[in-house]
Structures are given as C-alpha cells and as structure tokens.
Image: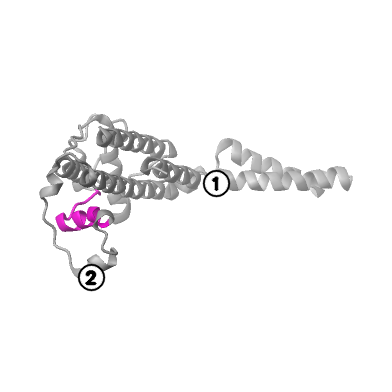
Amino acid sequence: MSVLETFENHVGSVHRLMNFDRDVLSFAIESIEELQERLTQHHRLDNPQLTAARTLQMLRGYREHDSLRPRYKTIFNQALVLLVSYFGSAVHDVFRVGVSAALTSERDSPLLREQLKISFAELKEANFDLRTRAPDLLVNAKDISFQDMKSIARAFKENLGVEIERTPMVNEIILAQACRHVIVHTGALADDALVRQLSGAHPRMLKPKIVSGELVEFTPEEVTSAAAAMVAYLRDLELKLRA
C-alpha cells in the first residue's frame, strides 16, 4: 500500500469519527425498528403507549435534523488535529521513500555528499543495513521537521531537489496546521501568533478571516475540505518524486 493510499484510509477514519453521532443514531434506530416490528406484529400491540413508536419517531427526527451535531463541535476540532497529524506522518513517509530512491538511483544526487554520524549501536540496531535506516538518520541529523509547510518545502528542495510551489492548496494546509496548534495549546482560542502566521496564507477558502480572540471551530465540511487539499498535495508530491 502506497503512502497516499494509507493516508486516504486515515482520512476515512477521520470522517467516521465526525459521523459518530449519525452512526450511533442509525444503529439505535435499526435496533428499535426491529423491536417495534416484534411488538406490533408478533405481540399484536397497537397502542403507541405500549410500543416503541414514539421513541422511534424521536430518534428519526434527531437523525433527519442532525440535532446532536452541535454537541460534537469538540469532536470536529479533534478530527482536524488528528488529520494534521496523519498528514505530517504521511509527508515524512514520502520523504523517506524519496531519500531511499535517490540513494539507490544511478543518477547523481546531493544526498551522496551528505556526511552523517552514526554509532556502532545504531548500526547494530539497523542490522548493519543502512539502506533502510538512512532516511531516518538524515532526518535526525538535520533536525528536519514535517510539522509546517515551510519546513516541508525546504526539506524536499534541499535534499531531493523537489520544488513545491506555493498554491491555494498549500494555503489550506497551512491554515489547518496553524489551527491545529491553537486547538491543542490555547483551547482553540485564536491569538496574535495565529493571525500573523496566516497573514501570508492567501488566497484560501478555509476560514479566510480569523480574528485574535475568537474561538476556532471547524465544521465537518471544513475538515473534509482540508483533507482534500492534503490528498491533492501528497499526490502531487509523489508525482514530482517519480519525475
């Protein structure tokens, strides 16, 4: 399974998390429908006071109008946090694949002139096979971060010669990463640092204007939009590496 396919599976799990209330309601409705059928058809009960009819009507109303959604705002923000973490891990994996390919290629690469320090303990841990361990050694030696788009672009350009253009898609991911930080560290309260960080991330569709002091709250649609930008970015990155 490719890095992109793995990330898309993770995106699916994030979507399921955001639809947890709908899944629970659907399960409850299906179970109560079966109960209602037994009460009315097998036990011949037609008095709504003695059946599950009213409960079923209420639950169907909750599902139809998404009545429980407002209570899940925290889950939607946490879904974004999870998505950004998955993205950082996926970019790291793409970088590792790129480094391995560059080191085994017949073509010249700036990586071949990199000097790394490695202990015998690390060699032993890698079973004396540096081919698989080299990408992680490079990341550790150069303290490469995959937590923000600027660091990601620099890592791919300096080590693999891959230029990543600044596009609206990149701006969407910058927004997601920056908001992830305030969700985790400031209780989702936007601060001046967030506003400054996003000042150059234009144009973008996701939350085009954020004011310091306001609460950052994501909707499922916004998380889905961020995920789509990340999938497109990873797909483009893999194509650049193949080229």
Residue depicted at x 25% and y 48%: 100
Q: Which mark is residue 117?
A: none
Residue in front for this viewpoint, 229 or 203: 229
Residue 80 sits above or below residue 170 on the image: below
Magenta highlight on residue 97: no
Q: Earlier in the sequence, mark 1 or mark 2?
A: 1
Q: Secondary structure under badge 1?
A: helix
Give the answer, above or below, for where 142 lies relative to 243: below
What predominant SS class does the magenta segment belong to?
helix
Question: On the image, numbered disc 2 is attached to which residue?
Answer: 121
Residue 210, position as x, y percentages in the image: 26, 39
Specify start and end residues of the magenta stretch as a single range. Answer: 133-147
Q: Which element is circle 2 on?
A: helix
Q: Residues within 10 Å of mark 1 (few under 14, many from 20)?
A: some
Q: Residues within 10 Å of mark 2 (few under 14, many from 20)?
A: few
Residue at image mark 1: 21
Question: Which amino acid lies under the numbered mark 1 shown in the image of this protein?
Answer: Asp
Image quadrant holding the C terminus, namely: top left
Please name the amino acid that badge 2 sits on: Ala
Point out residue 158 in the picture as x, y percentages from the top left corner: 13, 43
Quadrant occupied by the N terminus: top left
Which residue sits at x=28%, y=67%?
Answer: 125
Where residue 175 appears, as percent x and y from the top left, is 27, 40
Residue ID at (13%, 58%): 116
- Report the side of 51 relative to 81 (left or right): right
Q: Quadrant of residue 143?
A: bottom left
Is residue 142 visible in this depiction of the protein? yes
Vertical side of 105 occupied by 116: above or below: below
Q: Is residue 139 magenta?
A: yes
